[in-house]
Amino acid sequence: MNHHLASDEISRATLRAEAVIDLDAISANVSRLHAHVQSRDVLAVVKADGYGHGIIESARAARAGGASWLGVALIDEALQLREAGDTDPILSWLAVPGERYAEGIAAGVELAAYSVSQLDEIALAARQVGRRAGIHLKFDSGLGRGGATPDEWGRVVEAAAAAQEAGAIEVTGVFSHLACADEPEHPSVKAQALEFEVGIGQALEAGLEPKHLHLANSPATLALPDTWLTMVRPGIAIYGVSPFADGQSPVLLQPAMTLRARLALVKRVPAGQGISYGHTFTTTRETTLGLVPLGYADGVPRHASNQGEVLVRGQRFRTVGRVCMDQFVIDLGDAEGAAGDPVVIFGDPSRGEPSAADWAVAADTIGYEIVTRVGPRVPRSYVGALA
């Protein structure tokens, strides 16, 4: 749940922690990506509560930046967007048997289909609603996850063509997903692109005329022009986090989320003091510790214990000892510090702050997980023209 907070400084000064979301950054990132792909359609992915940034707010910012489509995993997420007043194209791509297809179709949400049985279920729901279902068929070009395999694909496109002929569905798109686009030279990228071309050809041979062909996720949108087709599908990039291991990007990306807190306690301790559970860190000299009131329940990764850095009073300080459920400790050395001091866990490196990518390295994970896992105990506040 996202909480809209009063923006006056008095209320903000009493907060334990907050995630500040710059909606202008999301809009600017989408706009730059749209220009980068030479004005092809941009489907902005806002699943998982907008990767932790707030689904409704992120969607509004993405639309303002030029996203003609929004992408979500779940039909419930799509319905949430509709209830908030979004009337433009939305694609939902993850479902299980017995899904709320009728509600999605009634709301004009386009649906992904992977199999003949799923097509049958969607067609039945469409007839019950009395409205054609817009369908994007998903082809497994080599990721080995969702989508119809090349062996199954012929039956899927034939079933889709029959359901379209019967007036139950309209196949508006065909798509696939890349396994290794964050390693642009990986041989699987070209192999998947070629396999997808074959799959598209089979769909056309079956009499389908999909307008939207999409393969490119964030890394492909940034670095693989041959994968852009008619539409690109960026997710993490719209939030200003690079999908590449080195944290770099060929397009300027502005981080949208700043996770910050205030020190709960500052205290001086002697040499030889063990810190936090398991005493995985012991002080080697007298030093000052700062207690940050955020922990793994709030999304701070425990795997970043003794590694992650934060910014206090313009200086970077490292976490020491294990990250706990609600709090972690930083070593301030002999630097000045006081309870109540602002702490930036991650934000915009152009301001000298640690980035989500820095924390990803510290936790041996990816930037996607760092922003998406920021928990519901952390209130979100919004800044920018759209806030």
Image (tube, rainbow, N blue to C red):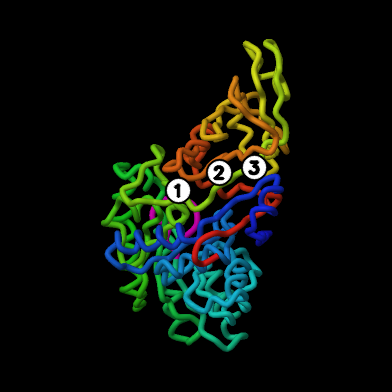
Label 3 SS: strand
Q: Residues within 10 Å of mark 2 (few under 14, many from 20)?
A: many
The residue that mark 2 highlights is 370
- Give the residue type at disc 2: Ile
Which secondary structure is most common in the magenta stretch? loop
- Label 1 belongs to which residue? 241
The three-letter code of the residue at mark 3 reads: Ala
**Residue 142, image x and y in percent?**
40, 51
Residue at 46% x, 61% y: name it. Answer: 24
The local crowd at label 3, few if under 14, some if 14 to 19, many if 20 or more residues have their Cα within 10 Å, is: many
Rendering quarter of residue 54: bottom right
Does 77 sit above or below residue 372? below
Image coords of residue 284 (percent x, y)? 62, 11
Mark sitting on residue 261: 3
Please report the bounds of the magenta region as a residue range. 138-147
- Of the 4 image quadrants, the one containing the C terminus is bottom right
Q: Classify the position of the N terminus by image quarter.
A: bottom right
